[in-house]
Image (spheres, rainbow, N blue to C red):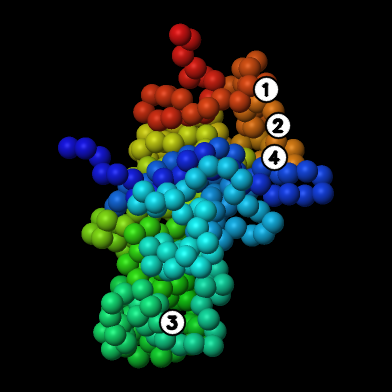
Amino acid sequence: MTDPAPLLEVRHLRVEFPTRRGRLVALDDVSFSIAPGEVLGVVGESGAGKSMTGAAIIGLLEPPGRITGGEILLEGRRIDNLPHEELRRIRGRKIGAIFQDPLTTLNPLYTIGRQLVETMTTHLPIGPAEARERAIGWLEQVGIPAARERIDSYPHQFSGGMRQRVVIALALCAEPRLVIADEPTTALDVSIQAQVIALLKRLAREKGTAMMLITHDMGVIAETADRVAVMYAGRIVEIGPVREVVKNPRHPYSAGLMASIPPLDRRVERLAAIEGAMPRLSAIPPGCAYHPRCPRILSRCAVERPELMEAGGTMAACWLYHRHD
């Protein structure tokens, strides 16, 4: 059986911000794909480029940031060079986005029911009455109690966690092919988090939706994702099956991230921490950007930048895995 064609392909993506002192490279040669029904987790510290990658895919980069290289394909069709209006149509219909802050997504002047109904009638071949019934169903699926009564409430009448569930319903109700979820469960308490994660997983499996899950929470990734991409300083430093990356990380940075997760089976006095901090965009070191913090540095790490290479069960951008031909 052949693998299904990827639903999303990102090839050699480069994003730059022009400044008075020259151009800052925010994403540098980022490549990955997501198959239908697959959840790709994207992790890394703040500033690694996770959210920037999601924003580039959905065409919502903050100016003056812009894509200066590479291409993004959705269902085999290039979308990064489309006119604004065409991309906006695709964004509603084929790509759903879940952001961390529900207030940026919801219109405070409309009831949540109106927002859900408008989204569905715009993108699906259904009328308002059916859309309203479906909207109630979606609110129930994301765990809004008494959804039939609450559908005519305004966003400000919901708590933060409830608003975030409404945002998730709004992103999913047009049945998009791809969902970009940027820290979708940060504002939720743990039990609701589990419910939302289960919903996202079910959607991927049943509807064949491809999902890019951006988070700094490895627990969420381990629970939800099929594969995981670890980002550092605007590049992917390791990508592979979630079990491999969690249990047996190959890149020293991935290993540092995994070591900082508290174990459930024993008490530890102190969690391992990675020394130092992520470099600023204006001061990314030469060679491997991680080398100033790396406990396993080799002489070439400071001068030559490694590409992703075979590293056992994953691909890692690390000279430790360089094969001498």
Q: Which residue is mark 4?
A: 279
Q: CA distance from mark 3 to mark 2?
A: 46 Å
Q: CA distance from mark 1 to mark 3?
A: 52 Å
Q: In the rendered view, would you say 200 is above or below 265?
A: below
Name the kind of residue labelled 2 in the image.
Pro
Q: Which residue occupies the foreground of this view, 202 or 77?
A: 77
Q: In the rendered view, would you say 89 is above or below 216?
A: below
Is the residue marked by circle 3 packed among few (<14), some (14-19), or many (20+) residues within 10 Å? Answer: some
Name the kind of residue labelled 3 in the image.
Gln
Residue visible at 17% across and 37% down?
A: 1
Name the kind of residue labelled 1 in the image.
Ala
* Numbered badge on residue 115: 3
Pick whichever of labels 1 and 3 is earlier in the sequence. Answer: 3
Name the kind of residue labelled 4 in the image.
Pro
Q: Evaluate if marks 4 and 2 touch, with contact meaning CB atoms under 8 Å apart.
A: yes
Q: CA distance from mark 4 to mark 2?
A: 8 Å
Pick whichever of labels 4 and 1 is earlier in the sequence. Answer: 4
Identify the element where label 4 is drawn: loop
Residue visible at 63% across and 52% down?
A: 66
Pick whichever of labels 2 and 1 is earlier in the sequence. Answer: 2
Q: Which residue is mark 1?
A: 302
Pick whichever of labels 4 and 2 is earlier in the sequence. Answer: 4
Image x and y of residue 2, in percent: 21, 37
The reply, left or right, for residue 282 in relation to residue 141 is right
Image x and y of residue 213, in percent: 44, 53
Q: In the rendered view, would you say 186 is above or below 110?
A: above
Is the residue marked by circle 2 packed among few (<14), some (14-19), or many (20+) residues within 10 Å? Answer: some
Image x and y of residue 164, in percent: 47, 71
Please name which of the two marks, 4 or 3, marks the residue nearer to the observer. Answer: 3
Identify the element where label 1 is drawn: helix
Q: Is residue 186 visible?
A: no
